[in-house]
């Protein structure tokens, strides 16, 4: 019996054409910090902490959803939302209002895309190819001296995505992703106080961890159950033959 189980595990857990097709699964909030960085700039490139007009205040977040790489088609499917421990607030880097706006609050953030092109740079390590985009949904509130502002819903269809994901021992799948700054811009300005609006480009950096899809675990358990049944039947036949 032990030899049958060992053989099954060797076949199931070793890299294979069938199992290697889909890597990733359900994002685990407890293991996924979610947003780990956010910036706002007046230019698309370079948008770095050194050039940023807006900086993240560091509020804690977590992520939920799914991320899966299909190695047969070299594509990634992504559907995640960010839960916030508080508002995702950006403050001006120099402490002075930008076009009359002192704080920006993002909320209800979600990102999704299907068929994102990836390349396998190392075994089980996948990098998103250049020029890939995602749909970003959420709301943005501009806070200024004239008032708290109202949240405005948005949908950005062509927010750029970059980054890479890595499978670890086929048990976890970790990703470091960046959304924006290209395709993720907003008009910022307190027009009620007479300020003109100006375009600002934003990017969100996320860290997420996923575990294999339930179907993989079910397949493994189902196979073990089948082998156990087969082994029992063989032992029964052998005993009858001995008798």
Image: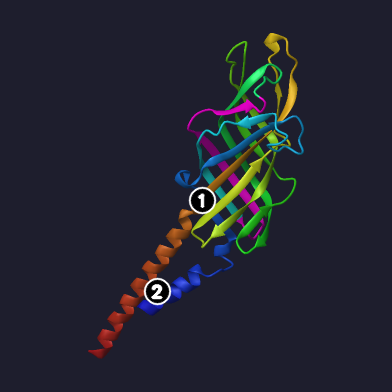
155 to 12, vertically: above or below:
above
Q: Position of residue 145 (x, y in %)?
A: 62, 12
Instruction: Give the x, y percent position of residue 238.
Output: 29, 85
Residue 85 drawn in magenta = yes
Q: Which residue lies furthest to the front in this view?
A: 94
User: Which is the main secondary structure of the residues drawn in magenta?
Assistant: strand
Residue 24 is tagged as none
Q: Residue 5 carries which label?
A: 2
Classify mark 2: helix, strand or loop.
helix
- For the point 56% across and 58% down, the residue is 167
Answer left or right for 48 relative to 10: right
Residue at the spot x=54%, y=54% of the render?
A: 173
Front residue of this view, candidates 130 and 228: 130
Which corner quadrant of the image does residue 43 belong to?
Answer: top right
The quarter of the image holding the C terminus is bottom left
Distance between mark 2 and mark 1 Cα atoms: 27 Å
């Amino acid at each position: 019996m032990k030899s049958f189980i060992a053989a099954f595990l060797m076949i199931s857990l070793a890299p294979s054409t069938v199992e290697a097709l889909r890597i990733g699964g359900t994002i685990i909030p407890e293991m996924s910090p979610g947003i780990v960085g956010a910036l706002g700039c007046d230019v698309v490139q370079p948008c770095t902490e050194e050039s940023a007009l807006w900086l993240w205040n560091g509020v804690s977040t977590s992520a939920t959803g799914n991320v899966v790489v299909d190695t047969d088609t070299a594509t990634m499917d992504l559907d995640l939302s960010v839960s916030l421990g508080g508002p995702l607030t950006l403050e001006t880097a120099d402490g002075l209002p930008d076009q009359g706006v002192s704080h920006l609050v993002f909320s209800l953030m979600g990102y999704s895309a299907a068929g994102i092109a990836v390349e396998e740079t190392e075994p089980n390590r996948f990098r998103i190819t250049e020029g890939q985009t995602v749909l970003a949904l959420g709301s943005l509130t501009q806070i200024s001296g004239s008032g708290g502002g109202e949240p405005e819903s948005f949908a950005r269809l062509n927010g750029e995505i970059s980054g890479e994901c890595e499978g670890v021992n086929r048990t976890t799948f970790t990703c470091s992703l960046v959304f924006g700054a290209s395709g993720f811009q907003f008009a910022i300005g307190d027009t009620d106080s007479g300020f003109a609006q100006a375009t600002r480009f934003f990017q969100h950096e996320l860290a997420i961890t996923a575990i294999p899809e339930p179907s993989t675990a079910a397949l493994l358990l189902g196979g073990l159950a089948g082998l156990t049944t087969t082994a029992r039947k063989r032992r029964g036949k052998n005993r009858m033959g001995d008798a």
